[in-house]
Image (cartoon, helix red, strand yellow):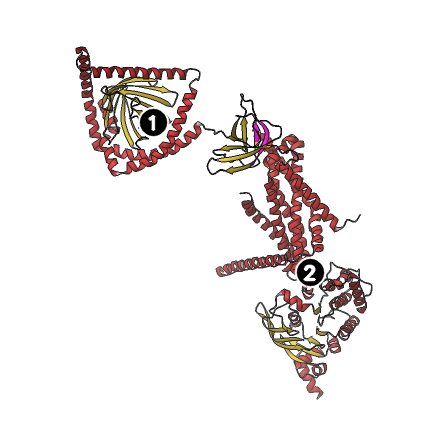
Amino acid sequence: MNISTEAKVGSMSLIACMLLIYIMIHLSGFTFGDKGYPVQAVFRQVNGLKEGNIVRYAGVDVGRIIEVRVLPQEGVQVTMVMDPGVKIPEGSKFLIGADGLMGEKYINIIPTDNSSSYLLPNAKVKGEEIQGLDELIASSDRVLAEVHDLVKSLNEIVGDDKVKAAMKNTILNAQEITDNMNIMMGNLARMTQENGDINVTVKNLSAMSRSLREASARAEVMMQAVDNDGKTARDLQETLVNIKNTSIRVEKMAAALEGVVTDPETAQNIKDTLKNARMASERANKMLTKVSSIDTKVGFETLYNQDTGKYSSNADLKINTSPTDFAIIGVSHIGDGSKGNFQVGKGNEEFAGRAGVIESKVGVGVDTKIGKQMSLSLDVYDPQDVRVKLRSLYQVAPDTFIVGQSDGINKQDEQTYFGVRRNF
Amino acid sequence: MLLAIVESIGRQVILWMENSGRIIILVGNTLFHLREKPRMNHVLHQMAHLGVDSLPIVLLTILFTGMVITLQTATEFIKYGAQSSVGGVVAIAMARELAPVLTGVVVAGRVGAAITAEIGSMKVTEQIDALRVMAINPIKYLVVPRLLACVIMVPILVIFADVIGTVGGYLVATLYAGISSFTYIHSITLFTVVNDIIGGLVKAMFFGGIIAIIGCYKGLTTGEGAEGVGRATTASVVSSIILIFISNYFLSLVLYR
Amino acid sequence: MIKLENISMSFHGKHILQGIDLEVKKGETLVVIGPSGSGKSTLLRLMVGLLKPTQGEVWIKGQEISHLSEDNLNKVRIGMGMVFQYSALFDSMTVGDNVAFGLREHTAMTEAEIQKIVARNLRMVGLAGQQDVMPNELSGGMKKRVSLARAIAIRPEIMLYDEPTAGLDPIMSGTIDRLIMNAKRVLCVTSVVVTHHMSSAFKIADRVAMIHGGRIIEVGTVEQIRQSENPVVQQFILGLKSPSAYVRRRSEMR
């Protein structure tokens, strides 16, 4: 049989066209007839989800994504087409997942138990955001990089001779302070006995002790909760979320801090007032070599006050004289009406109580550890005008913490701080 | 001595640039003549001659390429428990790179050589001059139909190649590597998108153009005698293949960003 | 009809033609003679625009062609036919298609009309009924005749012949010569014939131009060329060893 040129070319082209159309249909998942119904979900971000990706309901393929569009305000709108006959309960969670080795993204719909109605065609739902500790750590990492710069600047300050000398004085005065405190306590006791004209003081004092009792009771409850099954996991989750928000603020703060530390005047202020830091530990080591189990730790923190928009720097020296006994010497609000701290305490990492001078006033405090990385402190001070201070520390690196602090939570002028702490 | 080396390098560079320039002029001329209605019977004749007749060799080459690719990937992938990706990987490799490039190479060897030999022998026997004297533009008469035929037929060949390559992969995956036929086919749909195929066809069009233009250029610039035709034919195949590989890289860069 | 003015031509710095002035009148047959490599074929190619002169002007029917684009040149070429030294038949086509080629490309004739002309032209060159033969089945002389049939099919006003009788036996040469004269008589064409066969040159020529070393050294009628005093011309006509041989022979004759 003699096949003509036209027939040869024609048949080959025809077969090729049919193959191409078949491939196209096969690959684009195009179906004839019933097309299913669209559902829109809005996500804050979609992690590389694109058109043609699969939609899964409880792990079963039920549709495809036909459009991914960025909205001007709300985020990213993903339009998907559900296969006909598939019913999605209202209130189901829409999450973005990734497939195994080669990582195709897909939308995962997690069914909800308690729903009587189903999503209608063209329904608009809100996509869930997956937030884990990894994200938190990721943002903390950036903060740390900036903290590192900060610490470098600080080391220059701490190395100064004047600072060392001042620190020495502080330590020498420590004994004196304890003596004075003893006298003060004695006076107080006497005054109470004499039932003198100091009703106010007494009242305050009792209020103070009440607050402290309450605070420690609360901490105790919290600890029990943590030890318990996991009832307060939600509380912890909340705390984590708060901390995450904090870390974002810390990031902002760290940027601003650079300006503070590099500002010559402020640097001088910090220099002049941070009389403790490294010297303190040297000095303390010298002084206390006799005691074998001595261990000193210097910490420095910079906090940002959300309410006033001001920064505040605190420095402290913790001396462990025995595994259970410790003393804290420190300065807070450096350069801005610096306040002194001197407390002696007892306790371990899990729970410790302190008493002494807090923010230049007489006071007591407790520290408690919640979980691995989290610790809480509650301080009550100033018998004349009782103030309560709540602090939380979240460890992001071996020597670095994110600090949340609320001053005077029992007062109108409550001040909230967030910041970073670094131990040396 | 040194001067002689520098001079010879210079001569090569000038020659190379001269050739490039002439090819560009030829492309320009050819495109210019595309505005007129091409001789459909010539185009058809060339399509049959250059396209249809190349189908068996293309099919054979790509079938075995698909088979060997699957043979190699399947064993490795199964080691890592990723047998569900084999079909997709083979299909993507086929559609994006292997089918267009190998078809291009096979067609360059077969069709590019044929074009150069035909036009080259026309050139040495003064048939090109005869055409010109008879007021026929050789570019319009010889180059345009071949270019059109190649630009149309190479993508068509690639469609066949895509299919046969994947089929070859399927055979090895199911019969030799023990991957289930559903897994293989499903992974193709999962990984391959329409753009993989389209990109491969766009490449194929460029390769067809390269083969036709280089083939015609080498033919039209053939030197004297039968020896000249032989040299031109070899040069045509070598240049086409090199250009296909180089342009393939840049096309991949642009098409699959 | 054809006029060359001060034509110079060089390839890669080698001068092929230098300062050529030549005119061919309408209906005239000019035979260009000269030894191999003297630039005869180049001259012919310049006339049909296959080559562009390095310098000078080529006028065809009052139009300067050396600066025309290929497309405009083709308009001029429709009125021209050329018989190549090696025939240059399209070997992918039958003899009939070769002859019909120009008609199919350039005229709106029906296939029947074309076939009639093809048959007549083939009969004219003595190859009647050979339409379906492929060129590679033909002998050299037959190819030449098909080539001639192809060239005259579109009834050109100018015919160019590049060595039409080279490599042919004397009988076939004679046939070709007669066909050239026939074409001239029947179609009234202006012809330029390049040859180095003196017998055919003198048979067909109205005028003869002798080209030597890239220059035209003598132009004249057949008689004028025969009587030429130029030793180089005489050497070529008589096939002598050197120009001085002619000078010696002439002095002997006196």
Drawn side of residue A333 relative to residue A3, left or right: left
Inspect the image, locate mark 1, and give the three-letter code of the amino acid beneath it.
Val
Distance CA(mark 1)–CA(mark 2): 88 Å
Residue A65 is inside the magenta segment? yes
Residue B28 is inside the magenta segment? no
Which stretch is magenta? A55-66
Q: Position of residue A213 (x, y in %)?
A: 30, 15
Inspect the image, locate mark 2, and give the three-letter code of the amino acid beneath it.
Met
Name the quadrant containing residue B222. Answer: bottom right
As displayed, is residue C165 above or below residue A393? below
- Check if mark 1's residue and mark 2's residue have beta carbons within 8 Å: no
Disc number placed over residue A30 in the picture, else none: none
Q: Which residue is mark 2?
A: B122
Q: Position of residue B114 (x, y in %)?
A: 68, 53
Q: Position of residue B253 (x, y in %)?
A: 54, 45
Q: Is residue B84 visible from the viewing direction of this image?
A: yes
Q: Secondary structure at mark 1?
A: strand
Report in which chain the residue with disc 2 lies. B
Work out whether residue B7 or residue C139 is closer to the camera in this orientation and state it: C139
Q: Position of residue A60 (x, y in %)?
A: 59, 27
Residue at the (62%, 40%) spot, across then down: B94
Name the quadrant containing residue A59. Answer: top right
Q: Secondary structure at mark 2?
A: helix
Work out whether residue A405 or residue B222 is closer to the camera in this orientation and state it: A405
Disc number placed over residue A403 in the picture, else none: 1
Q: Is residue C196 visible from the viewing direction of this image?
A: no
Quadrant placement of the N terminus of chain C: bottom right
